[in-house]
Image (cartoon, helix red, strand yellow):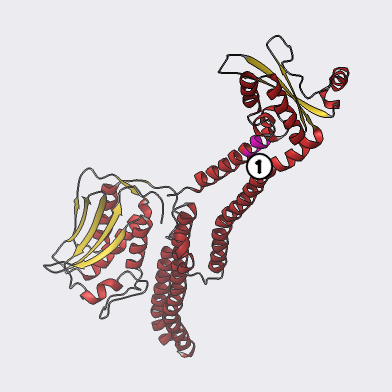
Amino acid sequence: MRSLFWRIFASFWLAFALVAGLSLLLGRALNQDAWILNQHPALDGLAEHWAQLYEQRGKGAAQAYLEQRKQQFQIDVQVLDDDGQALVNGTFSRRAAAFEARQGDQRHLPWRRLTEEYHSPATGTNYLLIYRIAHRQLGTWHRDSLFWPLSALGIALIVLSLFSLLLTQSFTRPLQRLRSAVHDLGQTSYQQTSLMQLANRRDEFGVLAQDFNRMGARLQSLISSQRQLLRDVSHELRSPLARLRIALALAERAGPEEREQLWPRLNLECDRLEALISEILALARLDADPGPAEPIDLAGLLSKLQDDAQLSAPQQQVRIHLQSGIKLYGWAEILERALDNLLRNALRFNPSGQAIELSASLHGARLQLCVRDHGPGVSAELLPKLGQAFFRAPGQSSSGHGLGLAIARRAAERHGGALSFSNAPDGGFIACLELPLQPTQAN
């Protein structure tokens, strides 16, 4: 992953290094002696060429060379030996030298004075050359010599401005897309394809877009399920309410004896309505935050479920197969409700004389909690629909609202697991909760 942190850090580091380097370059160019001695065309090779003329052709040729340089570049040159004695007359007048001595401070002189030592490799003699360049001529040369450094600085500033613009756009464009996606999500019109290109990036924005897509899909799924639940609830509540209204209308027109016969019917419909509302509330509570996961006493939980099943259906038998050494973390109340619904479903269809099997076994890092009955099972085409709210397999004569398996499925998802259904090869129906041993967080 190409981290934005290192990209920003490297960009600013490069910008500072470039500006610092150009600043040093310009600092050297601003009137420093070394810069003038190395770059001024009047001084280029002057010491070496003068020494060769002086040593090979004598004082006259060296003096003529200095005169020619003065006429061309308006520069005065003096040359002294190790003892401070002038080797040539030079091009600097005694009157000018006296004026320079009286001033003392070079800043008030009409010229710039520079000195250079030269060691002749041919004779081993040391020469001290004193240059005096008029400020007017030096200013003209400065303007010409600083053109390229200033041009380089201008180009660098343009490049930095363009780079900053691109860097800014690389931040603002993804943020603008995320902002648009947040707006669409708030308007319930979010499409995951709107962030598809951003999600393919290999930096923090790509990771954020992927997380946002997952969050958007999850929220849309929750909104859709809630809307479907409301539609299903409204549909399921109409039937008992309609029966209650009919029974009440009959009771109003009936005599005392007939009215007494209708009260059990009214109580039954009220009980069904209360049971339906309780199951709906239980399903809705599974979407609330259950808090941190805690250790679950699996053996105690299964034993309690076995006792409750024996009390509700004494003619049925429940056998427990528990693998030893299982340490499960989660939410005991949610898991108990899920297994209780699976057991009640098994008790509803299991024939007398055959035991219901409740097993818990490890498969890798996950736990399988399975409830098997020996009933007729479910046709293969209906297995994918089991667990949907208010879905009931056709042909059932037993009471129920189709919420038990939906509660069990949602409990499995809350633990980070899944609920699966299958028909046993030798007959019967199997419902299995596959759970992680220690969920990191509620789903």
Name the residue furthest bottom.
253
Q: Does the rendering let one see residue 370?
A: yes
The quarter in which the C terminus is drawn is bottom left
Q: Is residue 241 above or below residue 339?
A: below
User: Which residue bears the numbered disc 1?
Assistant: 149
Q: Magenta part mainly helix, strand or loop?
A: helix
> Residue 307, position in %: x, y?
26, 55
> Residue 283, position in %: x, y?
41, 65
Which of 189/125 is in front? 125
The kind of secondary structure element at disc 1 is helix
- Residue 155 covered by magenta stretch: no
Which of 148/63 is in front? 63
Which of 191/423 is in front? 191
Q: Which residues are magenta?
A: 22-26
The total number of labels drawn is 1
> Residue 275, position in %: x, y?
40, 69
Circle 1 Cα neighbour tier, 10 Å, few/some/many (<14 / 14–19 / ≥20): some
Which of 66/6 is in front? 66
Q: Is residue 154 above or below residue 26?
A: below
Q: Residue at x 70, y 33 (%)?
A: 42
Q: Residue at x 29, y 59 (%)?
A: 339
Residue type for callout 1: Pro
